[in-house]
Image (tube, rainbow, N blue to C red):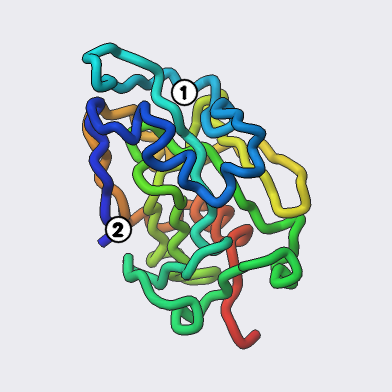
Amino acid sequence: MHQRFPNSPKDDGNWDLNKYNKNSPLWAYTGNSSGIWKCPADRSTGINNKGQTVPRIRSMAMNNWVGGEGWGNSGNWVPQNKSGWKVYLKQTDMTDPGPSHTWVFTDEREDSINDGCFWVDMSGYADQPALWHIVDFPGSYHNRAGEFSFADGHAENKKWLDDRTTPPLSKQDRALNQSTPGNKDVLWLQERSTRQTGL
């Protein structure tokens, strides 16, 4: 199963830049700008070490197939050379589906965001819709749409079509890795995330 980090309002990852954000390999390229890690439409809050309610500091997550070891299907973390799916470590690796069709960053919902990656399970891609799962839930802060940045530098606004992609916000940790057979939003994510190795 996809493991969750604590999503309690008091978890210091919700308000302390030093816990995760400043430890990111990307921090050196941000110009010390903490605002780029969060969508302004995300109004969620945390409780800091002084007991004060403060805005949460992050809503961004990175494609699990970009820059890391990669996830296998069904929630298993496996080395990149054994997952069966390509993991892109540099832009020149992105030969299929290509930089203009491979997303890198997106907003993740406040009741879903946990670790730094947004997991797209490739089970059933592309012609077995009964196997499609939604693991992490994308942001839908823009009239049921989410924002994506792609490896070539362009951005897209994706309007979600399936109600299972945009359930009502929960004040608790949302159960992740939900079976959503036939969810075309999952197929959209799969098409823009990775491809099988050896093809």
Cβ–Cβ under 8 Å for marks 1 and 2: no
Q: Residues within 10 Å of mark 2 (few under 14, many from 20)?
A: some
Percent of width and height locating residue 21:
47, 39
- In this view, 75 is above or below 46: below
The front one of 66 and 183 is 66
Q: In the visual, does 18 lie left or right of 4?
A: right
Percent of width and height locating residue 120:
47, 58
The front one of 18 and 180 is 18
Residue 162 makes an appearance in the image: no
Amino acid of disc 1: Asp
Q: Secondary structure at mark 2?
A: loop
Disc 1 to disc 2, C-alpha distance: 23 Å
The front one of 176 and 185 is 176
The dot on residue 22 is: none
- In this view, 187 is above or below 173: below
Q: Which residue is mark 2?
A: 2
Q: Which residue is mark 1?
A: 42
Q: Residues within 10 Å of mark 1 (few under 14, many from 20)?
A: many
Q: Residue at x 41, y 36 (%)?
A: 18
First-in-chain label (1 vs 2): 2
Residue 95's quadrant in the figure? Answer: bottom right
